[in-house]
């Protein structure tokens, strides 16, 4: 299977905002970032720890912001959203 980079099929056509916010990748990324931060904040307020990946490790952060390494993760190939969407 060839890649989009090989075909050079992915090109930027326009940089301005789309009419529908859900068609604009930048806005979608921003919404996801805000939702994540809100969820983490709500978890801390409720006294619940959160688990996330940082520097190749799976870490748990407690509501008092104490960080504990759960385990070291294996190196994996970086996920390329543009390449994934090209084949969809």
Image (cartoon, rainbow, N blue to C red):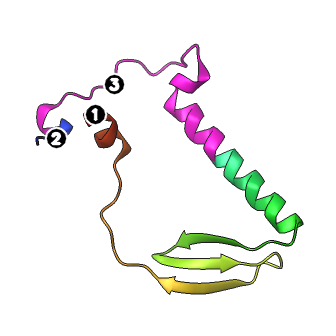
Write the residue at 50% across / 32% down: 25
Q: CA distance from mark 1 to mark 3?
A: 13 Å
Q: Is residue 58 left or right of residue 79?
A: right
User: Is 12 covered by the magenta stretch?
Assistant: yes
Q: Looking at the picture, how far across and down is residue 79, in whole percent?
A: 35, 54
Q: Looking at the picture, how far across and down is residue 12, in whole percent?
A: 34, 25
The part of the chain drawn in magenta is 6-32
Q: Quadrant of residue 73?
A: bottom left
Q: Is residue 38 above or below residue 68?
A: above
> Front-most of 8 and 61?
61
Q: Which mark is nearer the camera, 1 or 3?
A: 1
Quadrant holding the N terminus: top left
Q: Is residue 59 left or right of residue 77?
A: right
**Residue beneath disc 2:** 3
Q: CA distance from mark 2 to mark 3?
A: 17 Å
Q: Check residue 86 in the rendering and tell me which mark sits there, or answer none.
A: 1
Decide: few, some or many residues near mark 1? Use Cα within 10 Å; few <14, some 14-19, many ≥20.
few
Query: Along the polypeptide, which appears first: circle 1 or circle 3?
Result: 3
**Residue beneath disc 3:** 12
């Amino acid at each position: 299977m060839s890649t989009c980079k090989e075909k050079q099929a992915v090109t930027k056509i326009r940089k301005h905002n789309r009419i529908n916010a859900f068609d604009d990748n930048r806005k979608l990324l921003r919404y996801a970032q805000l939702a994540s931060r809100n969820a983490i904040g709500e978890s801390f307020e409720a006294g619940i720890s959160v688990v996330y990946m940082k520097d190749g490790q799976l870490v748990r952060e407690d509501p008092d912001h104490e960080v504990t390494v759960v385990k070291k993760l294996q190196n994996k190939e970086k996920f390329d959203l543009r390449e994934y969407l090209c084949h969809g």
